[in-house]
Amino acid sequence: MKSIKYIIMAAAVGLSLSSCMNGDDSMFNDDWKDINSSVAPYGNNNITEENVITIAELKANATYAAAISGNKYEKITDDVKIKGRIVGNDLGGNIYKQIVVQDATGGIIVGINKAGLCGYLAEGQEILISLKDLYIGGYGGMAQIGSPYNGGIGRMAESIWMNHFKLVGDIDASQIKPIEFTANSVGNESLVGKLVVLKNVTFKNADGKKTLKDGAPSGSNYFNQELDGFPNSVVVRTSNYADFAAMKLPYDTVKKEKVPIDIVGVLSMFIDNNGNKTLQIMIRKTNDIAVAGSVEAGDGSGSDTPDTPAADAQGDGTLENPFNAAAAVQYASSLAADTKSDKEFYIKGKVSSIATDKNGKAQNFDSGYGNATFFISDDGSTVSTQFQVFRALYLGNKKYESGDILKEGDEVVVYGKVINYKGNTPETVQGEAYLYSLNGKTE
């Protein structure tokens, strides 16, 4: 069974990374194992499970603790290892060139100078990391394993990383159930670096218009949103490049009230030069924002996948019986990573949110390319199952040219091929889909 697993994983990695590698196979060891073997074809399978310490023990080492708090770095000279599960990666674009590893005692960031890490470092994968000759340090007081960079800690080259980790067992996301984080948890720094859930919360700025990106700018290309019931030192932090950055803050436009939700994310920390500490919730993927009460909290074991009540998949993709958003997500998710569907489908729904530009302004269409990116759901809300229409053309398969063409709540039928982008984002194929109808109008 393991050989089958690694054949599938190797194929997925090849598909998800081929477009960005440009033929560069530096991510793999020179002694690549035949994919028919029973060991993983990446990493260092010679690492043994000896001298394993906990993440809490690693961070508590006096020398390392000083480097972390001082935003410096220290070389790890002891032959020690840590073992945990991956609870965060670059799957949704909000965590960049990093993975987050957690055990029962704590969590830590591992910086790797390579994109597309989710292709072989999946959430729920248990991992053994040999720390000797790697570096540990702090960025804003947040512990990270990596390499020296500008006097502090940065990302290590992937060629170094490949010699320092080993995949252990099968991927099992059920082992990384999030820990509940409340306003009373603010002083508990043992949770920093771990997967947490904030239950039944609302965004302070939710008004039916603002998106995750419409928060206070923070650093380069990041935005912070505050939450009701929490101090302003606790924020949801979103990258401008995250797949879900354009999602609206949950709000009921009919009742004119904020919608309570459960939020799952990695808890990170940043301490500025004045000693001000900010706790940052780093959402990993779209379904980390779930219906209130749907996420079961735990102590670090269990499932990390929000059990969001999803709409029933309906339709067969024909004009007479188009896919709804749930059916489109279901079908595209069944495809191999980055594999286009072999035919076009009709998909019907209401516009739930529209992509925004880097300034957070709704971008009804891209004037440079004449296409638009938006999300649809059955009822037009952002808490229902959503499907992404990615860079689709206008009515009649023509380019968008001008005007406020799309708005939230519009009923649309989209026609085109779908894809499971990078194996984790079901969407229409760029440039191979268009609006078949807009509020009943066709062209």
Image: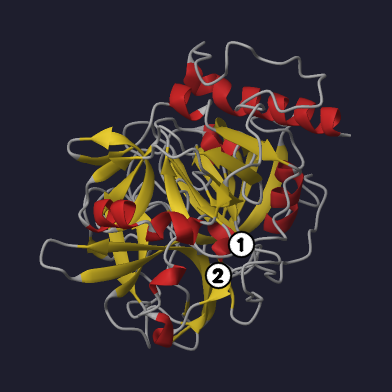
Could you say which is closer to the camera, residue 295 or residue 258?
295
For the N terminus, the quadrant is: top right
Amino acid type of the residue that numbered disc 2 sits on in the rendered structure:
Ser
> Which of the labelled discs sits on residue 381, or is there none?
2
Q: Residue drawn 24% across and 35% down?
A: 149
From the viewer's perspective, is residue 423 above or below residue 181?
above
Amino acid type of the residue that numbered disc 1 sits on in the rendered structure:
Ser
Q: CA distance from mark 2 to mark 1?
A: 6 Å
Could you say which is closer to the camera, residue 24 or residue 389?
24
Question: How far across and how far down the image is residue 329, in percent?
Answer: 69, 50
Could you say which is closer to the camera, residue 280 or residue 408?
280
Local secondary structure at mark 1: strand
Q: Residues within 10 Å of mark 1 (few under 14, many from 20)?
A: many
From the viewer's perspective, is residue 331 above or below residue 211?
above
Residue to which mark 1 is pinned? 377
For the C terminus, the quadrant is: top right
CB atoms at circles 2 and 1 under 8 Å apart? yes
Q: Is residue 14 visible?
A: yes
Question: How far across and how far down the image is residue 69, in percent?
Answer: 25, 58
The coloring applied to the image is: secondary structure
* Image quarter of residue 3: top right
Question: How far across and how far down the image is residue 172, in percent?
Answer: 73, 52
> Which of the labelled discs sits on residue 250, or is there none?
none
Q: Is residue 411 visible?
A: no
Which residue is at the far left? 274
Q: Residue drawn 35% across and 36% down?
A: 155
From the viewer's perspective, is residue 241 above or below residue 77?
below
Could you say which is closer to the camera, residue 164 or residue 326?
164
